[in-house]
Amino acid sequence: MAEAASEISNTAIVKIAQQSWIPMRKEASSASEMVSSLLFGEKAKVISQQNDWLEVQCLHDDYIGFIPESYFESSLSIDWNSEISFNPKLISIEIENQPFLLSPGSKISKKLLQNLQGGTEISHWVPFCLQYLNTPYLWGGRSIFGIDCSGFTQVYAEYRGLALPRDAYQQAEVGSTVNYGHHQPGDLAFFHNASGRITHVGIILEDQKIIHASGKVRIDNFTINGIQHIDNQRLTHELSCIKRCFTNV
């Protein structure tokens, strides 16, 4: 049976994102900072309602924020009870004669996704990450249209089959610690500010390089001290720790 933009699950109302991406705000105001976002097909449980705003909790990472109720007004004829797949690349799709440009990380029916196969295939985490290069930095962003550092690593980890929490300091609690020099491609590197708080994260590549979202998704040098800007050699982020969440490279 086709589902609308919401469903009932154990007496809770669950909303389904049916736009390319939906911003989540810290407070029930369009002027409030964006703290995260939902990608197409992701679900969030309604906690409360303040006028036209819904306080929701994302089902994939338990993150809480506010979204205008109007963002869930669409009612596409999609069978959300069928097998839903992780979309690994930017795709253009038509649903009910309406165009959608869907970011990697969005959710779509497996059958529909199989019918769209073609062009460049994403069969490894490295090309998955490289497709985000030059994506503009956006606080709270998780899509190829705008992304922050931990949003990038969260979607990367999901591609590899691991659910990570939303923020960098939370992600630093996952996996096993690896010393510099024993790291390998695919490990996560975390960086702290002057007060010692972890505020940044990136994905280690081969040849002492790292891909991360800072201004835009970019590749810089990865050193024992931290991230070194690839053009001017300036140290931009101070290394805090390295975590291994995946055993295979």
Image: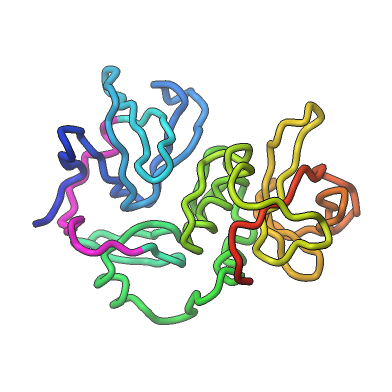
Q: Is residue 149 magenta?
A: no
Q: Position of residue 248 (x, y in %)?
A: 60, 71
Q: Position of residue 242 (x, y in %)?
A: 72, 51
Q: Quadrant of the N terminus?
A: bottom left
The one nearer the camera, 67 or 168, is: 168
Name the residue rendered at 48%, 38% in the picture. Answer: 36
* Quarter residue 246 falls in: bottom right
Q: Is residue 75 left or right of residue 131?
A: left
* Quarter residue 97 falls in: bottom left
Residue at the extreme top of the image, as rendered: 51
Magenta-highlighted residues: 69-85
Name the residue rendered at 19%, 62% in the picture. Answer: 82
Main SS type for the magenta part? Answer: loop
Q: Is residue 132 left or right of residue 20?
A: right
Q: Indicate whether 100 appears above or below 199.
A: below
Q: Quadrant of the C terminus?
A: bottom right
Q: Position of residue 80 (x, y in %)?
A: 20, 56
Q: Indicate whether 29 appears above or below 93.
A: above
Q: Is residue 62 left or right of residue 94?
A: right
Residue at the extreme front of the image, as rendered: 176
